[in-house]
Image: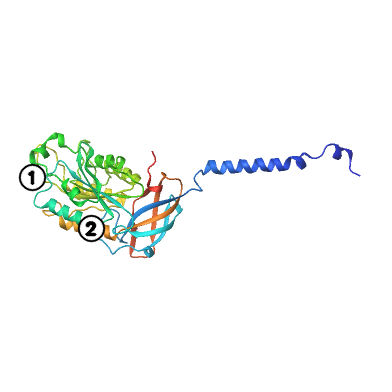
């Protein structure tokens, strides 16, 4: 016999448990998505990488090594989470299009002594998967003279030598080469997330107009700002040191060659790029350093990884090699999907 109090007042849990379970489950799901809204998102992301000697310190220059192989790459983490490599291909002569913007300092008289001939040959040597654009550093911006194109003659025709008077004109002040790079990163011509991006910048690398003396053991904040902008936009920089042997304006404070090259090293270390210089003086011919750049590009590869997160998320990149004699070099951080967040 069932007691009256049990029959007339059944336990509430018998009737409310299914609803309670449903509410609890829904609440748990909402909490999970609130805490990690993009945990389920898997975003393919392209990264340009190459190898460096294991004993090389960050920011040091080194000769191009043999092309990186997929077997050289061990663990990859994006935002602290393991990322799977879904594609591996060479940067040059590979399936991906590389947009290379070549920008020249308007304060420098670049183009004499066959320098443009060397640059044009470099253009012609580029494989078909490379688009080349040309621009000029001017008033903290990159003025585009030619958008990225596969027409080598068209790109070469956009190269114009400054006269001494033009280079000395205050209106041709570049403002700051790193401010120019930052502006280029935010206003890349014909930007396409399916295409890779790189910039070859001819300048002395000196920051002007900030009125600050940079200590030798400190990073340059202008370089750091440009580095962050380039990484967010997926642009790999290759700064090429050039300072006119004859200073266009003796009253202009040119700083020092060492300052510019130190800035180059900082920029390259943070972004996975490479600084191009030999000694403290401008090269009389550009071909040796341009040949070095070609070797660097030829040693690089494009890896596509599946990263946890939504497109536009900026995340730290960590890579380890399977070998003890090399390190894997790339940018410090990447933007998922190669699409910077607006």
Classify mark 1: residues with Cα within 10 Å, few (<14), some (14-19) or many (20+). Answer: few
> Is 64 drawn above or below residue 244 in the view shown?
below
The answer for how far apart the CA atoms under marks 1 and 2 are is 29 Å
Disc 2 element: helix
Quadrant assignment for the N terminus: top right
Q: Which mark is residue 276?
A: none
Q: How many numbered tags mark residues here? A: 2
Relative side of 169 to 128, left or right: left
Which residue is label 2 attached to?
294
The residue lying toward the viewer, choosing from 96 and 5, is: 96
Question: Residue 125: x, y in percent?
Answer: 20, 58
For the question of whether residue 335 can be seen, the reply is no
Classify mark 2: residues with Cα within 10 Å, few (<14), some (14-19) or many (20+). Answer: some
> Is 154 drawn above or below residue 61 in the view shown?
above
Quadrant assignment for the C terminus: top left
Disc 1 element: loop
Question: Residue 268: x, y in percent?
Answer: 27, 51
The residue at 35%/64% (across/down) is 69
What colouring method underlies this structural image?
A: rainbow
> Which of the 4 image quadrants contains residue 164?
top left
Which residue is label 1 attached to?
246
Question: Residue 276: x, y in percent?
Answer: 21, 53
Q: Nearer the viewer, mark 1 or mark 2?
A: 2
Most extreme residue toward the right, as rendered?
Answer: 1
Question: Residue 172: x, y in percent?
Answer: 15, 37
């Amino acid at each position: 016999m069932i007691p009256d109090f049990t029959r007339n007042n059944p336990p509430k849990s018998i009737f409310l448990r299914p609803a309670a379970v449903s509410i609890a489950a829904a609440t748990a799901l909402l909490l999970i998505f609130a805490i990690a809204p993009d945990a389920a998102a898997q975003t393919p992301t392209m990264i340009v990488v190459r190898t460096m000697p294991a004993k090389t310190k960050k920011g040091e220059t080194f000769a191009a090594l043999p092309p990186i192989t997929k077997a050289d790459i061990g663990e990859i983490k994006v935002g602290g989470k393991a990322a799977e490599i879904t594609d591996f291909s060479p940067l040059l002569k590979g399936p991906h299009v590389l947009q290379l913007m070549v920008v020249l300092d308007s304060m420098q008289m670049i183009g004499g002594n066959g320098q443009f001939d060397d640059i044009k040959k470099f253009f012609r040597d580029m494989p078909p998967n490379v688009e080349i654009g040309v621009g000029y550093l001017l008033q903290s911006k990159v003025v585009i003279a030619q958008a990225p194109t596969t027409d080598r003659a068209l790109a070469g025709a956009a190269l114009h030598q400054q006269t001494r008077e033009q280079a000395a004109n205050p209106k041709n002040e570049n403002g700051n080469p790193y401010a120019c790079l930052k502006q280029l990163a935010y206003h890349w011509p014909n930007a396409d997330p399916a295409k890779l991006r790189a910039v070859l910048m001819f300048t002395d690398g000196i920051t002007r107009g900030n009125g600050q003396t940079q200590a030798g053991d400190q990073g340059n904040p202008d370089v750091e700002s440009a580095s962050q902008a380039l990484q967010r936009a997926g642009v790999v920089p290759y700064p090429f040191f050039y300072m006119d042997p004859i200073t266009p304006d003796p009253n202009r404070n040119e700083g020092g060659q060492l300052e510019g090259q130190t800035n180059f090293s900082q920029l390259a270390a943070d972004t996975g790029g490479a600084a191009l210089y030999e000694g403290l003086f401008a090269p009389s011919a550009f071909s040796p350093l341009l040949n070095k750049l070609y070797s660097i590009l030829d040693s690089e590869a494009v890896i596509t990884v599946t990263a946890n997160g939504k497109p536009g998320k900026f995340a730290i990149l960590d890579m380890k090699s399977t070998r003890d004699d090399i390190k894997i070099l790339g940018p410090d951080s990447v933007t998922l999907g190669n699409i910077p967040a607006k």
